[in-house]
Image (tube, rainbow, N blue to C red):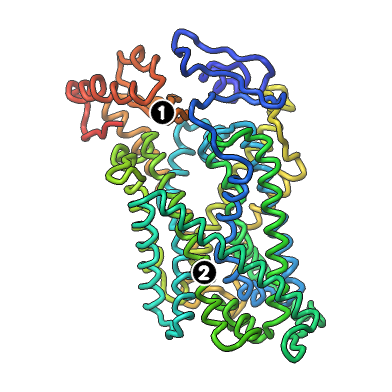
Amino acid sequence: MVKNYLSEININNPFRKNTVQVDEDSINDSTSLEVETENNDNVYTNIDKGKKQVGLISCVGLVVNRMLGAGIFAVPSTIYTLCGSIGLSLIIWAVGAIIALSGLYVYMEFGTAIPKNGGEKNYLEFIFKKPKFFATSMYASYVFFMGWAAGNSVNTAVMFLTAGEAKITEWNQRGLGVAIIAFAFIVNSVSVKYGLYLQNLLGIFKLGIVVFISITGWVALGGGLKGGYQSHNFHNAFEGTTKATAYGIVTALYNVIWSFIGYSNINYALGEVKDPARTLKIAGPSSLIVLAIIYMFVNIAFFAVVPKDKLISSKLILVADFFDIVFGGHAKRAASAFVGLSALGNVLSVIFAQGRVIQQLGREGVLPFSNFFASSKPFNSPMIGLFQHFIICIITILAPPPGDAYNFIMNLVSYPLNIINFCISLGLLWIYWEKRQGRMEWDPPLKAGVPVIVFFTLANLYLIVAPYIPPSDGESVYETLPYWIHCVVTWGVFGIGAAYYLLWAHILPWRGGYTLVNKEIVGEDGFWRNKIIKVYPGDEDDITNVTSADTVESLSDSVIEEKVSNNPKVGFPLVTI
């Protein structure tokens, strides 16, 4: 299977040193395939002609700004409630950090092997080459229907309502949540420049708050608060651990992993990164380890100040209760406002990224009405992609019952990601096996190693299976929804992807008398991307020399439309790709 794929892209082996075979007649000099070697690393890739302007510091920022959202302020209360003890809660945070670190190394191995924009989409397509376009369709459905920015929109609303001392009701938090995601959509659509400025400004609040909370916690442990106040929660820290269940542990891990989502953020922009192998080696682990330590310090600070009964009841406003106990007065309102701004920064960052993923899927021809989703009009921004994510987020916020909205959104985002991570890590083990059997070579600059990959695979398998274990009475994180609802919705989303695959890759080509062909082209920005093209009988020679986006558009106008109009087998209106 691997050798067949490699022959299709005119390469005997993508990681065999100094061995590349290219059909020179079909590729011109300006877009030729080359071996890119940095620091004597063995890397094969199509050389991007675009400017590589993302450096080490920017990559650290990509990880930190994506990971450091509202999760660390919102989930410690739920994690403590599910674990039953301070000690087990801290262990779950440590386990979650280890899982994230192992996942980071899996993604870094793929990233140094395939240093291109796109992240896990590239890796899934590399692993699952058959059935053709199946992995692409499933991934497109996952990206299209998941409301990534919805969770922190709700959390931002709760923080702002708390800051305004307003009573939090079922509908005002949802209404304000919709207004917040609408604001993020408008800002990122109208001005990319000022949207980024606002994200960076709000990023200052994130770092400032977590550092301040960490320091305050150590002061509290040292008896430095007013009157020497301490919660004494660390006395007999494991009391209550026996109440923990399998359902509680896996749900607590979901909450922790929600706070670590973003460790692979660099992989989405690797084509624009200077010296990607070196940058990944430094920026990835250093960012994740530092944030993991900060997360532990923030939890210790909460446990050092907030009594156990309030830890259970605080939920999303734990940080506000923390500041209220430490400083009193208006500190609770101020803290809520700052955390709300931090969460708003995360909302801006997430919808910024997701809009571009949707646009890229449109540019590749994966989505229906691809030209529509690929558009950058009217503000030279992915406004259509941003609007699509905006609509999905509104549905995600309003559809579940009000009391369950935040937990449902968080689990609905985390569960399918665990499935994807399981497939990627299992696929990497398969690549190792193929290499051992001599059927392929795999020698990227950075390797995770079998023990790390196996651990990450098993961890994700547990996170996939365990949510089906029924919770004990009163333990479900949902008030009215069934405990398995996020699992069923996830498989439903993937089911839509499978149905779309059958329609798009089989039924429509059969009725239309064409074949879908995947070509790598270099876009106007100088970066390589996939382009899925409709090829009719007799047009194979025209497709052979496709190397640029302009050539594809020319074919769309002159060849494909002509074939559509002249082909009597066409039974459906076809969208030009």
Residue that carries the numbered disc 1 in the rendered image = 523
Is residue 351 depicted above or below 55 in this figure?
below
> In the image, 189: left or right of 279?
left
Q: Residue at x 42, y 45 (%)?
A: 356
How packed is label 2: few (under 14 Cα within 10 Å), some, or many (20 or more)? many
Labelled disc at residue 407: 2
Closer-to-camera residue (323/172): 323
Q: Residue at x 27, y 45 (%)?
A: 378
Residue 504 visible in this rendered orientation of the protein: yes
User: Given the current orientation, which residue lies at the most extreme top position?
Assistant: 25
Q: Position of residue 311 (x, y in %)?
A: 64, 81
> In the image, 454: left or right of 202?
right
Callout 1 secondary element: loop
Q: Quadrant of residue 210?
A: bottom right
Callout 2 secondary element: helix
User: Given the current orientation, which residue lies at the most extreme bottom position?
Assistant: 227
Q: Position of residue 270 (x, y in %)?
A: 56, 37
Q: Residue at x 46, y 54 (%)?
A: 197
Q: Residue at x 48, y 32 (%)?
A: 131
> In the image, 432: left or right of 525?
right
Q: Earlier in the sequence, mark 2 or mark 1?
A: 2
Q: In which quarter of the image is the N terminus?
A: top right
Is residue 172 depicted above or below 139 in this figure?
below
> In the image, 577: left or right of 57?
left
Residues under labels 2 and 1: Cα distance?
Answer: 40 Å
Q: Where is residue 352 in the image (x, y as percent from the top left)?
A: 44, 51
Is residue 498 depicted above or below 319 in this figure?
above
